Image (cartoon, coloured by chain):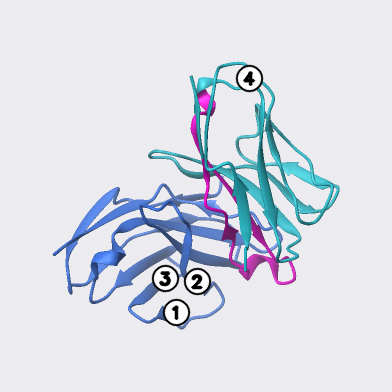
Chain colours: A cyan, B blue
Amino acid sequence: NAGVTQTPKFQVLKTGQSMTLQCAQDMNHEYMSWYRQDPGMGLRLIHYSVGAGITDQGEVPNGYNVSRSTTEDFPLRLLSAAPSQTSVYFCASSSTESSYNSPLHFGNGTRLTVT
Amino acid sequence: AQTVTQSQPEMSVQEAETVTLSCTYDTSESDYYLFWYKQPPSRQMILVIRQEAYKQQNATENRFSVNFQKAAKSFSLKISDSQLGDAAMYFCAYRVRGSQGNLIFGKGTKLSVKP
C-alpha cells in the first residue's frame, strides 16, 4: 500500500549542482505533479503530467525539468541548483477518470537546501 | 488569475471548542471542486474534506464540516470538538473541471489547539 513514494526525504546541495528528485506511484494514476512549498506561500505548481510522454509547465517551472516515460514515475530535475530553490517539494498524483473531483495523493515531501 | 485567499495566517482554539477557518476563492468558472487539506508537523498532506460546487448541501466528515457559499465564493472549514491532533497547517484548494487536474492552493492557516 505504498501510494506516492518520494526520495530522498532530505537533500543538501551546493549552488550549481544538479540532482533529481524521484517520485513513483503505484495507483495507476494518469495525473502526476510537482509542487513546491515555501513559508507563507502555500503550494505552487512546478510541472505536471496527464500521462506518459505528456508534460506541461505550472506556475513556477523555471530551473526545473521533468519527463514522464512511464505511468509510475515522474522525476523532477534541477539542472543547476540555486539558493532560491531551497524549499519543500511534493509530488502528487490523482486519477483523471473523474479528474476534477479526484483528490490529490501526496508523497511525504523532500526538504531541499541549496547553500 | 485564479486565486485562493486564506485571510487568517494563524488561529488558536481551546481543546473541545469549535473553530472556523475561512477561505475565499476567485474563479469565473462554474464547475469546480473544493478541498481542504491538513498538514501536521510530519509534513504529510492529508485530505480533510471536499465539496462539489454544484452541490448545495454542505459536506461533512465526522467533526469537520464546511460552509459553502457559492455566490460569495466562500468555503470555510468548521472543526467541532477540537482535539490536540487537529493542530496543523490547513490549506484550502480548488480545481476547475478541464484544468488538467491542477489544484490552486491558498497560503494556509496554522491552527494551534490549547489543552
Judged from the image, the secondary structure of the residue bearing numbered disc 1 is loop
Label 2, label 4: how far apart the Cα atoms are: 40 Å
Going by the image, does B74 lie left or right of A43? left
Residue A111, placed above or below residue B82: above
Disc 1: which chain? B
Check disc 3 and give the amino acid type: Gln
Residue drawn at (33%, 78%) of the image: B63
Badge 2 vs badge 1, beta-carbon distance below 8 Å: yes
Callout 1 environment at 10 Å: few (<14), some (14 to 19), or many (20+)?
some
The residue where tag 4 is placed is: A17
Name the spot of residue B3 as percent of width and height, x first.
50, 49
Q: Nearer the viewer, mark 4 or mark 3?
A: 4
Q: Which residue is mark 3?
A: B69
Residue pointed to by mark 1: B59
What segment is highlighted magenta in the picture? A84-110
Q: Is residue A77 above or below residue B59?
A: above
Q: Nearer the viewer, residue B7 or B105?
A: B105
C-alpha gap between disc 3 and disc 2: 14 Å
The chain carrying label 4 is A
Q: Are marks 4 and 3 in contact (CB under 8 Å)?
A: no
Residue A45 location (% of width, % of height): 60, 44
Identity of the residue drawn at 62% across and 54% down: A5
What is the CA distance from the residue labelled 2 to the residue labelled 1? 7 Å
Of the 4 image quadrants, the one containing the N terminus of chain B is top right
